[in-house]
Image: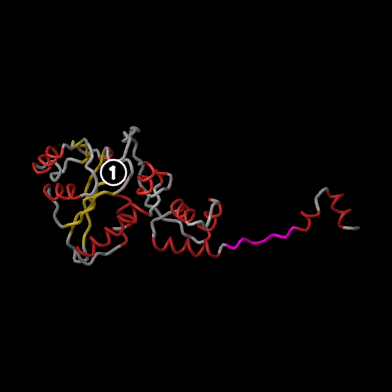
Protein backbone atom coordinates (compact mmCIF):
# COMPACT_ATOMS: atom_id res chain seq x y z
CA UNK A 1 0.00 0.00 0.00
CA UNK A 2 1.28 3.42 -0.86
CA UNK A 3 2.15 5.98 1.82
CA UNK A 4 -0.53 8.37 0.52
CA UNK A 5 -3.31 5.77 0.78
CA UNK A 6 -2.12 4.46 4.17
CA UNK A 7 -2.14 7.96 5.66
CA UNK A 8 -5.60 8.65 4.23
CA UNK A 9 -6.97 5.48 5.79
CA UNK A 10 -5.29 6.21 9.13
CA UNK A 11 -6.60 9.79 9.11
CA UNK A 12 -3.22 11.50 9.47
CA UNK A 13 -1.29 13.81 7.19
CA UNK A 14 1.83 12.68 5.39
CA UNK A 15 3.86 15.43 7.07
CA UNK A 16 2.98 13.97 10.49
CA UNK A 17 4.06 10.51 9.35
CA UNK A 18 7.37 11.82 8.03
CA UNK A 19 8.11 13.97 11.09
CA UNK A 20 11.36 13.17 12.86
CA UNK A 21 11.96 14.61 16.32
CA UNK A 22 14.83 17.06 16.45
CA UNK A 23 16.50 17.01 19.84
CA UNK A 24 16.84 20.40 21.50
CA UNK A 25 20.42 21.47 22.20
CA UNK A 26 20.51 22.47 25.87
CA UNK A 27 24.28 22.33 26.20
CA UNK A 28 24.84 26.08 26.42
CA UNK A 29 21.87 26.55 28.76
CA UNK A 30 23.04 23.76 31.07
CA UNK A 31 26.57 25.16 31.21
CA UNK A 32 25.39 28.70 32.04
CA UNK A 33 22.95 27.45 34.69
CA UNK A 34 25.72 25.46 36.36
CA UNK A 35 27.97 28.54 36.32
CA UNK A 36 25.27 30.70 37.92
CA UNK A 37 24.50 28.05 40.53
CA UNK A 38 28.20 27.83 41.38
CA UNK A 39 28.52 31.62 41.60
CA UNK A 40 25.33 32.07 43.63
CA UNK A 41 24.80 28.86 45.63
CA UNK A 42 21.68 30.17 47.44
CA UNK A 43 19.75 31.03 44.26
CA UNK A 44 16.84 28.72 43.52
CA UNK A 45 15.10 28.07 40.22
CA UNK A 46 13.07 31.33 40.06
CA UNK A 47 16.22 33.45 40.44
CA UNK A 48 18.26 31.40 37.97
CA UNK A 49 15.41 31.43 35.44
CA UNK A 50 15.07 35.20 35.71
CA UNK A 51 18.79 35.69 35.02
CA UNK A 52 18.82 33.22 32.13
CA UNK A 53 15.74 34.84 30.63
CA UNK A 54 17.37 38.26 30.89
CA UNK A 55 20.40 36.86 29.06
CA UNK A 56 18.13 35.49 26.32
CA UNK A 57 19.02 31.84 26.86
CA UNK A 58 15.54 30.61 27.80
CA UNK A 59 11.92 31.74 27.78
CA UNK A 60 9.99 28.67 28.86
CA UNK A 61 9.99 28.22 32.65
CA UNK A 62 9.25 24.48 32.32
CA UNK A 63 12.36 23.98 30.19
CA UNK A 64 14.66 25.72 32.68
CA UNK A 65 13.04 23.87 35.60
CA UNK A 66 13.55 20.50 33.87
CA UNK A 67 17.26 21.21 33.42
CA UNK A 68 17.45 22.61 36.96
CA UNK A 69 16.16 19.31 38.37
CA UNK A 70 18.23 17.14 36.04
CA UNK A 71 21.41 18.91 37.13
CA UNK A 72 20.53 18.48 40.82
CA UNK A 73 20.75 22.18 41.63
CA UNK A 74 17.94 22.29 44.20
CA UNK A 75 18.75 24.46 47.22
CA UNK A 76 18.36 22.81 50.59
CA UNK A 77 16.46 24.93 53.06
CA UNK A 78 16.36 24.63 56.81
CA UNK A 79 13.11 23.28 58.20
CA UNK A 80 11.48 25.61 60.67
CA UNK A 81 8.65 24.97 63.05
CA UNK A 82 5.35 26.57 62.16
CA UNK A 83 4.39 29.60 64.21
CA UNK A 84 0.76 30.67 64.29
CA UNK A 85 0.32 34.43 64.15
CA UNK A 86 -2.24 36.85 62.82
CA UNK A 87 -1.61 38.00 59.26
CA UNK A 88 -1.03 41.75 59.33
CA UNK A 89 -0.46 43.56 56.06
CA UNK A 90 2.62 45.76 56.23
CA UNK A 91 2.06 49.28 54.89
CA UNK A 92 4.00 49.76 51.69
CA UNK A 93 5.40 53.21 50.79
CA UNK A 94 4.09 54.76 47.59
CA UNK A 95 7.36 56.09 46.14
CA UNK A 96 11.13 55.76 46.36
CA UNK A 97 12.80 57.59 49.24
CA UNK A 98 9.62 57.84 51.28
CA UNK A 99 10.66 55.42 54.01
CA UNK A 100 13.84 53.55 54.85
CA UNK A 101 14.42 50.81 57.41
CA UNK A 102 17.63 49.80 59.17
CA UNK A 103 18.97 47.02 61.35
CA UNK A 104 22.19 45.26 62.38
CA UNK A 105 23.54 41.83 61.44
CA UNK A 106 26.36 40.16 63.39
CA UNK A 107 29.18 37.92 62.13
CA UNK A 108 32.78 37.14 63.04
CA UNK A 109 36.22 37.22 61.42
CA UNK A 110 38.52 34.24 60.96
CA UNK A 111 40.33 35.20 64.19
CA UNK A 112 37.04 34.94 66.11
CA UNK A 113 36.54 38.68 66.60
CA UNK A 114 32.93 39.69 66.15
CA UNK A 115 31.77 42.57 63.97
CA UNK A 116 28.41 43.94 62.94
CA UNK A 117 26.98 45.32 59.73
CA UNK A 118 24.53 48.21 59.51
CA UNK A 119 21.98 47.57 56.76
CA UNK A 120 19.76 50.39 55.50
CA UNK A 121 17.26 49.76 52.69
CA UNK A 122 14.66 51.72 50.76
CA UNK A 123 11.36 49.94 51.46
CA UNK A 124 9.84 50.88 48.09
CA UNK A 125 12.67 49.96 45.69
CA UNK A 126 14.28 47.36 48.05
CA UNK A 127 17.67 48.95 47.31
CA UNK A 128 20.40 48.72 49.94
CA UNK A 129 21.29 52.40 50.27
CA UNK A 130 23.79 52.12 53.16
CA UNK A 131 25.89 49.20 54.36
CA UNK A 132 28.69 49.64 56.91
CA UNK A 133 30.74 46.93 58.64
CA UNK A 134 32.84 47.55 61.76
CA UNK A 135 33.64 46.04 65.15
CA UNK A 136 31.79 48.88 66.89
CA UNK A 137 28.98 51.03 65.48
CA UNK A 138 27.36 53.44 67.89
CA UNK A 139 24.73 56.13 67.43
CA UNK A 140 27.21 58.73 66.15
CA UNK A 141 28.59 56.29 63.57
CA UNK A 142 25.06 55.45 62.39
CA UNK A 143 24.28 59.17 62.00
CA UNK A 144 27.50 59.74 60.02
CA UNK A 145 26.76 56.77 57.75
CA UNK A 146 23.25 58.05 56.99
CA UNK A 147 24.51 61.59 56.31
CA UNK A 148 27.26 60.25 54.02
CA UNK A 149 24.72 58.47 51.82
CA UNK A 150 24.43 59.88 48.31
CA UNK A 151 20.64 59.49 48.48
CA UNK A 152 18.20 62.16 49.58
CA UNK A 153 17.20 61.40 53.16
CA UNK A 154 13.68 59.94 53.58
CA UNK A 155 10.78 61.29 55.60
CA UNK A 156 11.04 58.44 58.10
CA UNK A 157 13.28 55.51 59.04
CA UNK A 158 11.96 52.35 60.69
CA UNK A 159 14.25 50.77 63.30
CA UNK A 160 14.18 48.69 66.46
CA UNK A 161 14.78 49.91 70.02
CA UNK A 162 18.51 49.19 70.12
CA UNK A 163 20.76 51.59 72.00
CA UNK A 164 22.41 52.70 68.76
CA UNK A 165 19.10 53.99 67.40
CA UNK A 166 17.68 55.41 70.64
CA UNK A 167 20.84 57.34 71.50
CA UNK A 168 20.94 61.11 71.90
CA UNK A 169 23.18 61.37 68.82
CA UNK A 170 20.48 59.80 66.67
CA UNK A 171 17.71 61.97 68.10
CA UNK A 172 19.79 65.10 67.47
CA UNK A 173 20.58 63.94 63.92
CA UNK A 174 16.92 63.17 63.19
CA UNK A 175 15.80 66.57 64.49
CA UNK A 176 18.48 68.40 62.51
CA UNK A 177 17.67 66.58 59.26
CA UNK A 178 13.88 66.52 59.82
CA UNK A 179 13.71 62.73 59.67
CA UNK A 180 11.18 60.82 61.78
CA UNK A 181 12.50 57.74 63.60
CA UNK A 182 9.72 55.12 63.70
CA UNK A 183 10.48 52.56 66.42
CA UNK A 184 8.91 49.11 66.21
CA UNK A 185 7.14 47.41 69.11
CA UNK A 186 9.64 45.76 71.51
CA UNK A 187 10.16 42.12 70.58
CA UNK A 188 8.23 42.46 67.30
CA UNK A 189 10.79 42.20 64.44
CA UNK A 190 7.88 41.52 62.07
CA UNK A 191 7.15 45.26 62.30
CA UNK A 192 10.45 45.78 60.47
CA UNK A 193 9.82 43.05 57.91
CA UNK A 194 11.48 44.71 54.91
CA UNK A 195 14.97 44.94 56.42
CA UNK A 196 14.55 41.59 58.21
CA UNK A 197 13.90 39.98 54.83
CA UNK A 198 16.98 41.72 53.42
CA UNK A 199 19.07 40.51 56.38
CA UNK A 200 18.20 36.92 55.54
CA UNK A 201 19.21 37.35 51.89
CA UNK A 202 22.42 39.11 52.96
CA UNK A 203 23.39 36.35 55.37
CA UNK A 204 22.68 33.56 52.88
CA UNK A 205 24.22 35.28 49.87
CA UNK A 206 27.26 36.89 51.48
CA UNK A 207 28.08 36.21 55.13
CA UNK A 208 27.52 32.43 54.93
CA UNK A 209 29.56 32.20 51.72
CA UNK A 210 32.79 33.81 52.97
CA UNK A 211 35.32 33.42 55.74
CA UNK A 212 36.64 36.93 56.29
CA UNK A 213 40.33 37.14 57.10
CA UNK A 214 40.09 40.72 58.38
CA UNK A 215 37.72 43.68 58.51
CA UNK A 216 39.16 45.24 55.34
CA UNK A 217 38.39 42.10 53.34
CA UNK A 218 34.93 41.93 54.90
CA UNK A 219 34.11 45.48 53.82
CA UNK A 220 35.38 44.80 50.30
CA UNK A 221 33.35 41.62 49.82
CA UNK A 222 30.25 43.10 51.44
CA UNK A 223 30.37 46.16 49.18
CA UNK A 224 30.80 43.90 46.14
CA UNK A 225 27.72 41.92 47.18
CA UNK A 226 25.73 45.12 47.77
CA UNK A 227 26.45 46.31 44.22
CA UNK A 228 25.46 42.89 42.86
CA UNK A 229 22.26 42.90 44.93
CA UNK A 230 21.22 46.36 43.74
CA UNK A 231 22.13 46.05 40.06
CA UNK A 232 22.01 42.37 39.07
CA UNK A 233 20.16 40.14 41.53
CA UNK A 234 16.50 39.62 40.49
CA UNK A 235 14.02 40.45 43.27
CA UNK A 236 10.88 38.30 43.38
CA UNK A 237 8.65 41.04 44.86
CA UNK A 238 9.70 43.41 42.06
CA UNK A 239 8.71 41.07 39.24
CA UNK A 240 12.24 39.60 39.19
CA UNK A 241 13.79 42.96 38.36
CA UNK A 242 16.94 44.15 40.16
CA UNK A 243 16.18 46.95 42.66
CA UNK A 244 18.17 49.56 40.71
CA UNK A 245 16.32 48.76 37.46
CA UNK A 246 12.97 48.92 39.30
CA UNK A 247 13.91 52.28 40.83
CA UNK A 248 14.86 53.66 37.42
CA UNK A 249 11.60 52.42 35.90
CA UNK A 250 9.54 53.86 38.76
CA UNK A 251 11.24 57.26 38.62
Q: Position of residue 97 (x, y in %)?
A: 27, 40
Q: Is residue 166 left or right of residue 228?
A: left
Question: Residue lying farthest right?
Answer: 1
154 relative to 47, above or below = above
Q: Position of residue 237 (x, y in %)?
A: 39, 43
Q: On the rendered image, what quadrant is the N terminus found in?
A: bottom right
Q: Is 96 covered by the magenta stretch? A: no
Q: Residue furthest front?
A: 251
On-image quarter of the C terminus: top left
Which residue in the protein does label 1 denote?
122
In this picture, residue 240 sits left or right of residue 217: right
Q: Is residue 184 above or below residue 40?
A: above
Pick the front one: 5 or 242: 242
Please identify the quarter of the rendering in which residue 25 is found: bottom right
Instruction: Tell me which residue sits at (52%, 58%) in the image.
Output: 57
Between 127 and 5, the residue placed more toward the observer is 127
Please provide the residue range marked out in magenta.
19-25
Seen at 17% across and 40% down, the residue is 161
Instruction: Check disc 1: other Cα within 10 Å, few if <14, some if 14-19, many if 20+.
Output: many
Extreme residue toward the left, this view? 168
- What colouring style does the render use? secondary structure
Q: Main secondary structure of the magenta part?
A: loop
Q: Residue at x 41, y 46 (%)?
A: 236
| Of residues 129 and 163, the one drawn nearer to the viewer in this rendering | 129
Give the side of residue 9 with respect to residue 96, left or right: right
Amino acid sequence: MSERRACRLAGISRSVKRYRHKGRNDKELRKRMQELAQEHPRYGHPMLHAILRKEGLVLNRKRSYRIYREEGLSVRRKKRGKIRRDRVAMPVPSCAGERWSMDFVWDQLACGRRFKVLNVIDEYTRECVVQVADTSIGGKRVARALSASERTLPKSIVCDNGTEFTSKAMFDWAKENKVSLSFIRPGKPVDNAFVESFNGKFREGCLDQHWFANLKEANRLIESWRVHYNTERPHSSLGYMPPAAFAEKAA
